[in-house]
């Protein structure tokens, strides 16, 4: 598998870490509901190897996916890791044996989460750790949690820090404490609540990494996307990713897939150049509802 372009390069601020703008999100490799192993372990391992062989050097994961499953798959498929591979993981949540993910934000829980990631990925230092805010409502202060992670960074367990599922105020709180190299929030062509934040971070050189770039587990459908896609000989999901790449140079993609055919499609989205008129039409999707 080879592609001409993976969307160009991005260097995380204040760092020597540089990645191709098209990466890969490993969450879809776990079992249904992000719980347990995939049906076909061999296929999941093979897909991860395809990802890296195609030139992807940015993989998103979390030890609470599975739990432990996506990290263990990454380790099985790719360890010892290529020197340029950047693995971004998350803390701030844990997955109990029954039920869904719950917040895990106390100092000891954060320390344990970092050590779980070190163990399951089999590394001495994590490349990027995102603090994932889990609270569904309200806007909890995050300074205490970022301070704990900054401490672990000083101890050499973490290279760089990011934040996820955060408001602009929470981003500012985190940036007052540490060098935050990326923000991972929900954003796509149909969901543009973070427009101003994307622009603000672009001015500061901070990466904006949208989760659900294709709309999540039930990828979105839109007549506008389909019309543009069929005219330019692409798929609607490729157009949605090309729109994100053109949206701002600090946007990094981590589409999730368990399908080799979809992986090929997603990697090839970097070769599309959308015309100004098409971008304007796509900008209208978020107003379509
Ligand atoms: N920070 C956070 O809170 C957070 C939350 C959610 C996700 N994430 C991260 O973000 C990554 C991306 O999010 P996501 O995986 O939830 O959602 P997504 O990338 O928006 O969409 C994934 C869904 O789209 C399908 N898909 C992928 N490529 C496709 C294509 N070319 N054509 C048609 N369907 C396609 C996948 O199914 P197939 O498997 O069949 O391709 C899957 O159902 C995750 O993998 C995870 O690493 C982070």
Image (tube, rainbow, N blue to C red):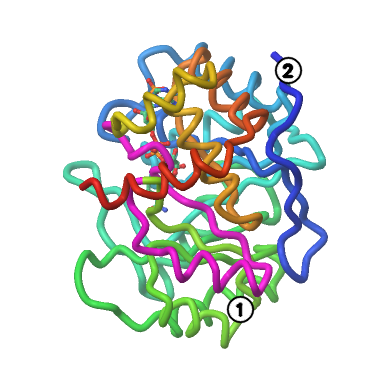
Tag 1: Cα neighbours inside 10 Å, few (<14), some, or many (≥20)?
Answer: some
- Residue tagged 1: 151
- Cα distance in 3D space between marks 2 and 1: 40 Å
**Which contiguous range is marked in magenta?**
190-218
Nearest the eye: 239 or 33? 239
Tag 2: Cα neighbours inside 10 Å, few (<14), some, or many (≥20)?
Answer: few
Image position, residue 89 (x, y; %): 53, 51
Q: Which residue is drawn at 40% across and 52% down?
A: 187
Nearest the eye: 101 or 186? 186
Quadrant showing the N terminus: top right
Image position, residue 45 (x, y; %): 56, 19
Q: Residue at x 28, y 78 (%)?
A: 139
Asked if residue 225 is among those painted magenta in the image, a careful observer would answer no
- Residue tagged 2: 2
Answer with the quarter of the image where residue 98 lies: top left
Q: How many marks?
A: 2
Residue 35 seen: no
Q: Would residue 263 appear left or right of 18 to someone viewing this image?
A: left
Against 223, is 193 above or below?
A: below
Residue 109 seen: yes
Secondary element at image label 1: helix
Image position, residue 3 (x, y; %): 72, 22
**Between marks 2 and 1 in the image, the one whose residue lies nearer the viewer:** 2
């Amino acid at each position: 598998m080879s592609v001409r372009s993976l969307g160009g390069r991005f260097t995380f601020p204040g760092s020597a870490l540089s990645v191709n703008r098209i990466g890969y999100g490993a969450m879809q490799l776990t079992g249904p509901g992000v719980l347990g192993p995939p049906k076909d372990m061999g296929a999941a391992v093979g897909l991860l190897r395809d990802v890296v062989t195609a030139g992807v050097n940015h993989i998103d994961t979390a030890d609470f996916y599975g739990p432990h499953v996506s990290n263990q798959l990454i380790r099985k498929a790719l360890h010892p890791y290529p020197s340029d591979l950047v693995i971004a993981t998350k803390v701030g949540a844990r997955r109990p044996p029954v039920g869904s993910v719950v917040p895990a934000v106390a100092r000891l829980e954060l320390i344990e989460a970092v050590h779980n990631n070190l163990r399951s990925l089999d590394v001495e230092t994590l490349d990027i750790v995102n603090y994932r805010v889990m609270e569904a409502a309200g806007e909890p202060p995050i300074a205490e949690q970022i301070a704990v992670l900054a401490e672990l960074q000083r101890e050499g367990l973490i290279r760089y820090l990011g934040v996820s599922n955060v408001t602009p105020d929470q981003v500012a709180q985190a940036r007052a404490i540490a060098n935050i190299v990326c923000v991972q929030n929900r954003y796509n062509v149909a969901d543009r609540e973070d427009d101003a934040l994307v622009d603000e971070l672009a001015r500061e050189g901070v990466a904006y990494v949208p989760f659900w770039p294709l709309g999540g587990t039930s990828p979105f459908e839109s007549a506008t996307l389909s019309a543009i896609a069929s005219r330019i000989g692409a798929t609607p999901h490729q157009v949605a990713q090309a729109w994100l790449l053109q949206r701002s140079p600090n946007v990094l993609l981590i589409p999730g897939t368990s399908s080799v055919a979809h992986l090929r499609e997603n990697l090839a989205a970097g070769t599309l150049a959308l015309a100004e008129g098409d971008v304007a039409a796509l900008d209208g999707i978020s107003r379509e509802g």
